[in-house]
Image (cartoon, rainbow, N blue to C red):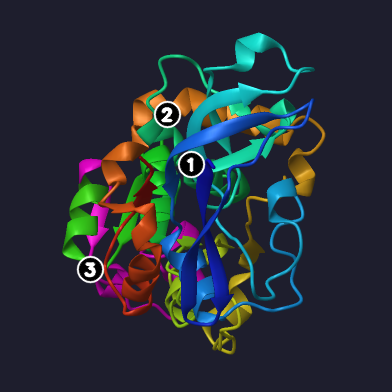
């Protein structure tokens, strides 16, 4: 009997690889044989550790992530592979197509064609597996509204932070500064054209109020996943500036000191999340249009250069254990034979 392998989180701190019969596509479905799936080190660590709100929907915008964060659950949202079987109602030219899917980690899965993104023939699958991170970065840039000549600070140079930095440095900005304590990530940010700092100390200026603080930025991103960094981000946002919070803290709470600089700054603190389009853009933008921007940007940004570790799907439990231990892995992916 043909089998498939699927990652499942069974309880906080527990992940297993289940062996199951390989699914057969319904008449209006195709089956995808996965080649790579990308692990989100921040989000999936939260899921693995149980630091997510149990009643929160996993992602209502993705059919493959139905339900909430109650255990047991399958999670993940970045699979690329090849269609190896098609239902009788599906055009036969789908067979052999390279596709991307927002789907949990599994060696094989079935889906209707309209739930898949059919990739251009020349698209490297190792770039395409990072489409969700690229889409998040595009969303962050859209939500930040960086004006020409703006000064921008990006806290956190994980994969999303680095891709956001890469997109920002392609715009006519005054400066893009990446704040990241890990030296290897700072080097990547610098290679993308950013000024890279180990901490925000070099940005600090003595000032009596926001108006007299030339060191503060027009636009700041908090992408570290650490609530404690929010105070730093507030301190670096200038008068009338915009602070975009793209981190997901799960059940961790943020404590902010809002009695000083913030009180008179008239800054905006904005949440940004990729599952939706910001209300001000919905008149002209759809998720399909945004994905088109992402696919077009893959060849220029080449996100596969950020892949740091490749793991066999059978070693999933060891990968999550290492993530929970505080590893500095930048972008791990699962590889399927």
* Left or right: 153 as drawn, with respect to 58: left
Mark 3, Cα crowd under 10 Å, few <14 / some 14-19 / many 20+, is some
Q: Earlier in the sequence, mark 1 or mark 2?
A: 1
Q: Nearer the viewer, residue 166 or 78?
A: 78
- In the picture, the disc for residue 298 is 2
Q: Earlier in the sequence, mark 3 or mark 1?
A: 1
Q: Which mark is residue 194?
A: none
* Image spot of residue 66 (x, y percent): 75, 57
Q: Residue at x 37, y 58 (%)?
A: 314
> Could you tell me which residue is drawn at 59 percent across and 76 percent down?
250
* Residue 198 badge: 3
Which residue is at a point 63% across and 33% down the rendered structure image?
Answer: 290
Residue position for label 1: 134
Q: Nearer the viewer, residue 292 or 312?
A: 312
The span picked out in magenta is 191-220
Marks 3 and 2, how far apart at CA = 28 Å
Q: Give the secondary structure at mark 1.
A: helix
Does the magenta portion include 219? yes
Residue 157 visible, this angle? no
Residue 129 lies left or right of residue 194; in this view the side is right
- Residue 34 percent location from the top left of the image: 48, 38
Instruction: Look at discs 3 and 2 and give the one toward the viewer.
Output: 2
Q: Is residue 80 visible?
A: yes
């Amino acid at each position: 009997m043909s089998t498939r392998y699927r990652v499942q989180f069974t309880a906080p701190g527990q992940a297993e690889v289940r062996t199951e019969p390989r699914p057969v596509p319904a008449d209006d479905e195709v089956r995808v044989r996965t080649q790579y799936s990308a692990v989100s080190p921040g989000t999936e660590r939260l899921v693995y550790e149980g630091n997510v709100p149990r009643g929160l929907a996993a992602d209502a915008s993705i059919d493959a992530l139905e339900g909430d964060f109650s255990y047991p659950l399958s999670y993940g949202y970045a699979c690329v592979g090849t269609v190896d079987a098609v239902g009788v109602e599906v055009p036969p030219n789908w067979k052999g197509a390279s596709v991307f899917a927002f789907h949990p980690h599994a060696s094989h899965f079935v889906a209707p064609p309209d739930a898949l993104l059919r990739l251009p023939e020349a698209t490297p699958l190792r770039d395409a597996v990072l489409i969700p991170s690229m889409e998040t970065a595009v969303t962050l840039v859209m939500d930040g509204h960086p004006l020409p000549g703006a000064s921008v600070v990006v806290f956190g140079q994980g994969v999303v932070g680095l891709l956001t930095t890469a997109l920002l440095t392609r715009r006519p900005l005054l400066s893009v500064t990446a704040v990241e304590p890990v030296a290897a990530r700072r080097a990547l940010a610098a290679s993308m054209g950013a000024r890279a700092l180990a901490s925000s100390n070099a940005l600090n200026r003595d000032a009596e109020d926001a108006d007299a603080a030339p060191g503060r930025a027009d636009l700041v991103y908090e992408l570290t996943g650490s609530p404690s960094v929010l105070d730093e981000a507030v301190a670096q946002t200038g008068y009338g500036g915009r602070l975009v919070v793209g981190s997901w803290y799960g059940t961790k709470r943020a404590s902010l000191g809002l009695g000083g600089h913030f009180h008179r700054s008239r800054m905006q603190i904005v949440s940004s999340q990729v599952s939706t389009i910001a209300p001000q853009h919905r008149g002209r933008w759809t998720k399909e249009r945004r994905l088109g921007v992402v696919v077009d940007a893959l060849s220029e940004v080449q996100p596969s250069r950020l892949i740091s570790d490749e793991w066999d799907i059978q070693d999933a439990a060891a990968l999550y254990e290492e993530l929970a231990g505080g590893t500095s892995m930048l972008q791990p992916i699962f590889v399927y034979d």
